[in-house]
Amino acid sequence: MKAWSKGLFIAVLAILATAIPLAAARSSSASHSAPQLFTYVIGQGILCSLEEKACPDIAMADNGDMVALNGTGTLSTHAKSVTGGGMFVHVSSSGHELVHGTWEAKDLLSFVSYGDATPQGLPANLFGGKAVIHVSLLVGGTVVHDGILTVYCVLGNPPHGAHEGVRLVVQDVINFNKQVSGDTVFVK
């Protein structure tokens, strides 16, 4: 997530707070050994009103093809579980739509927290991090490919060189390995 105005953050906090499961609210007082629960938001909802290129998230492959996607769900760090999904559109390097469909989260492969957003002067329930999620890609309701979706939010204290956005590896098909635009956030 990039720079937001303080007024918009109050609105974000109010809207996102209604989307957070009750268990996530309880986890904020839990010890580090307890599961950490987060809601993730990728290129949709309130993020879209914050800046021009926030939605959807876009990543590009080496051949110039691009994928635009959005979605939301929850993840638990110690239980290594994930829910959620969203939509995607694969566009050729010449700008023609090749396929569109939905994606579903299947497994949380890893999550690294970059910490809360207080270094940016934002609410402590907003977090940066890197989530790696095994997803299924569906076209017309039928699974056509598996993929690895990596979600980056650079709030908190991200490592040097980290960039906001997503990457998607469609196994044995194409690697959208360059983040182009879009915003994401993890909410605790």
Image (spheres, rainbow, N blue to C red):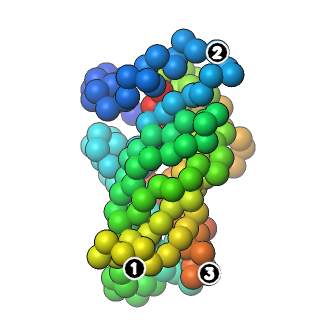
For the residue labelled by badge 2, is the local secondary structure a helix, a strand or a loop? loop
**Amino acid type, label 2:** Ser
Q: Which residue is mark 3?
A: 172
Residue at the image position 44 percent from the left and 36 percent from the top: 39
**Amino acid type, label 1:** Val
Number of numbered discs: 3
Residue 8 is at least partly visible in this image:
no
Q: Is residue 63 left or right of residue 183?
A: right
Q: Residue furthest right?
A: 160
Residue 64 is at least partly visible in this image:
yes
**Amino acid type, label 3:** Asp
Eye-nearest disc, 1 or 2: 2
Q: Earlier in the sequence, mark 1 or mark 3?
A: 1
Residue at the image position 45 percent from the left and 25 percent from the top: 24
For residue 31, the mark is: 2
Residue at the image position 39 percent from the left and 33 percent from the top: 4
Question: Does residue 128 lie above or below 146 as drawn?
Answer: above
Q: Residues within 10 Å of mark 1 (few under 14, many from 20)?
A: some
Judging depth in this view, the residue of 149 and 44 nearest the camera is 149
Spot occupied by residue 73 in the image (x, y as percentages of width and height): 41, 44
Q: What separation in Å lies between label 2 and label 3 (alpha carbons)?
A: 40 Å
Q: What separation in Å lies between label 1 and label 3 (alpha carbons)?
A: 18 Å
Q: Is residue 79 left or right of residue 48?
A: right
